[in-house]
Image: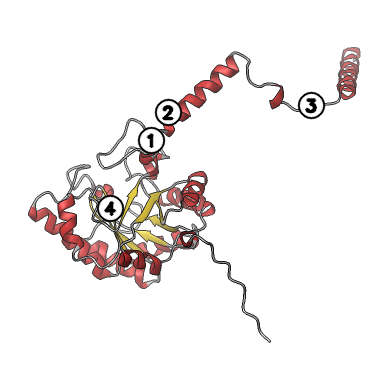
Amino acid sequence: MSTLPTVHIPSDASRLPMTLPRLAEKKALGEPIVMVTAYDYPSALAVDTAGVDLVLVGDSGAMTVLGYDSTVPVELDELLMLAKAVRRGLKTPFLVGDLPFGSYEVSDEQAVQTAFRFVKEAGCDAVKLEGGGPASCARARAIIGAGIPVMGHVGLTPQTATALGGYRAQGRTAAAATRVAADALALQEAGCFSIVFEAIPAGVTDVIMEHMEIPVIGIGAGPATDGQVLVLHDLLGIHPDFKPKFAKRFADVHGEMLRGVEAYAEAVRTRAFPGPEHTYGIAPEEIDRLKDRLRADKERSTAT
């Protein structure tokens, strides 16, 4: 007689692993989707415990954790390293890996091979690529055809910001907004499961959303999208000198880090740290034996 396995369902349904059908259901029900970036194991633990829906290992990690001045220089292996660390800290969020500049544009074959690495080596559930032109759509279709879900990205696409005139809002004229809409619809037609709208006027987003059948995640694109994404370092205030217009700080982590390190340095310099509670003990007789041995060793060394 066969028995069915016991299935433990958490009281909070948000703690179930996020899946593509659940994302589509959220859109259908009008439930806001929460997405955030993460780049290492500690941040992955935090966003997982907070119950976010989607986690992006973004190429923004090039600047936030690797110190580059843009997203362009970051190497595929560097992002894979970050993605592996994030994967180890996640249980329920859907993990998306950002395809870095130069890792997918050359050909469909290159794009598929890069996507394979994010899934096989880093454990990502999906990948994201930028742009909605013919080349990007072709790459998206190829990756999807290979069995890997793809998230699109339109509006301000940081990897090609120079060609867009810098880090500035896109779609601020009817002609430009039409191009953004065309890119979004093309990616939707190509089979993307979701699309990021970045730095697009809210009014333009309102119009395009009427034509979107897949979840849209906004970053500086107004409140009409199905969800929002922010860079972890922006929302936590880890880099105080950089604050995009569309970002809101929900914490002052940099301030706390600075205060903590300053307090530590002061405690060391005044010999207030370490205290007795921070040290390990040893029996007095063992100390006596240690002194005797060191004394005997010194006497033998002097005699020779």
**Residue 281: assigned label:** 3
Give me the C-alpha separation between circle 2 and circle 1.
8 Å
Q: Dot 1: what SS? A: loop
Three-letter code, disc 1: Gly
Does dot 2 land on a helix, a strand or a loop? helix
Residue 114 horizontal/vertical position (percent): 40, 60
Q: Quadrant where the C terminus lies?
A: top right
- As drawn, the residue found furthest toward the bottom would be 1
Say what secondary structure mark 4 lies in: strand
Q: CA distance from mark 1 to mark 4?
A: 20 Å
Find residue 125 and report its image quarter: bottom left
- Amino acid type of the residue that numbered disc 4 sits on in the rendered structure: Gly
Q: CA distance from mark 3 to mark 2?
A: 35 Å
Give neighbour class at mark 1: few <14, some 14-19, many 20+ (Cα, 10 Å). many
**As displayed, is residue 199 above or below residue 9?**
above
- For label 3, the SS is loop
- 104 up-or-down from 264: above or below: below
Q: Quadrant of the N terminus?
A: bottom right
Disc with the residue nearer the chain's start (1 vs 4): 4
The residues bearing labels 4 and 3 have C-alpha atoms spaced at a distance of 56 Å
Residue at 21 percent across and 44 percent down: it is 162
Pointer 2 residue: 255
Lower sequence index among marks 4 and 3:
4
Circle 1 is placed at which residue position? Answer: 237
Read off the residue under disc 4.
218
